Image: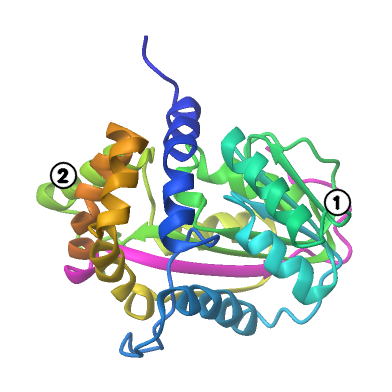
Amino acid sequence: MTLTLQQQISRFYDASSELWEQVWGEHMHHGYYGATGTDRKERRQAQIDLIEELLTWAEVQQATDILDVGCGIGGSSLYLAEKFHARATGITLSPVQANRARQRSQAAGLGDRTTFLVADALNMPFADASFDFVWSLESGEHMPDKRKFMQECYRVLKPGGRFLMATWCHRPATPPHHPTLTQDERQHLETIYRVYCLPYVISLPEYEAIAQDLGLQSIQTADWSVAVAPFWNVVIDSAFTPAAIVGLLRSGWTTIQAALSLGLMSRGYERGLVKFGLLTGQKSPHDVTPPLT
């Protein structure tokens, strides 16, 4: 039986999340190594720094009701809830991740202010205008319909609320200013897709065009590829410690394959093919209806 993309993603994170937490902790995303990518820092601190740098870049100084789209085991959700003394809701396709996020929220004393659900980001179980801050850190790459994903984020955003995403992209490929992707580049991306359960990625200008079409205001974008690229070499170093190897063997083939393929991302950054794209914008204070499909 062929698994759907949702099932593949769910099983991938069901199998790998315990190992990731054991080796890396609660934050399942890139680290920030300074604007030039040359800062040397402890790996988990680099991940916290990425969250803080994103908030500073997007000028997010307060939030009341937060949605974390692709919440993992609750790393960002709990961090943001505590930082802003806010309510936070996280969604993931992985039951294992949602359950672990709930356990961690209780342990942190945040159980009364956080909710974690197994839910599809393309069809969120929330009413229109439910959140004043929608946060998506490295989940857009998993979405099989990028426009529908951003449309749903827009729909659940309150008027005047802010959307902030960081996601894997490929380099711009729009003639005449940027050459189209070569066959070798496309093959490189296809291998990444297969290993990490991704349908496809798009360029940052394409995300910006979708955001403009949806009606987001004060849109800003940035390419932080240089700042985060060292992350993959650090992951490679940590993946082959004795403890990690034992964990990999217990996690199964999909996790082992992902570990053996870490160099794909590192090489992707080195050749300028893989990009780490940021986008933020606000919903108009006067927009009280969801966008047209």
Q: Which residue: 55% across, 68% down? A: 279
- Which quadrant, please, contains the C terminus? top right
Q: Which residue: 53% across, 62% down? A: 27
Would residue 287 be counted in the magenta stretch? Answer: yes
Question: What's the CA distance linking mark 1 and mark 2?
Answer: 40 Å
Q: Which residue: 17% across, 63% down? A: 267
Residue of label 2: 187
- Which quadrant, please, contains the N terminus? top left
The first of marks 1 and 2 along the sequence is 1
At label 1, counting other C-alpha atoms closer than 10 Å, the crowd grade (few under 14, some 14-19, many 20 or more) is some
Q: How many marks?
A: 2
Range drawn in magenta: 269-293
Q: Nearer the viewer, residue 46 or 158?
A: 46
Horizontal relation, residue 174 to residue 74: left or right: left
Q: Nearer the viewer, residue 250 or 229?
A: 250
Residue of label 1: 130
Q: Nearer the viewer, residue 55 or 178?
A: 55
The colour style of the image is rainbow
Where disc 2 sits, the SS reads helix
Horizontal relation, residue 78 to residue 24: left or right: right
| Residue positioned most to the top | 1
Q: Which residue: 27% across, 33% down? A: 253
Rendering coords of residue 94 (x, y %) = 56, 36
At label 2, counting other C-alpha atoms closer than 10 Å, the crowd grade (few under 14, some 14-19, many 20 or more) is few
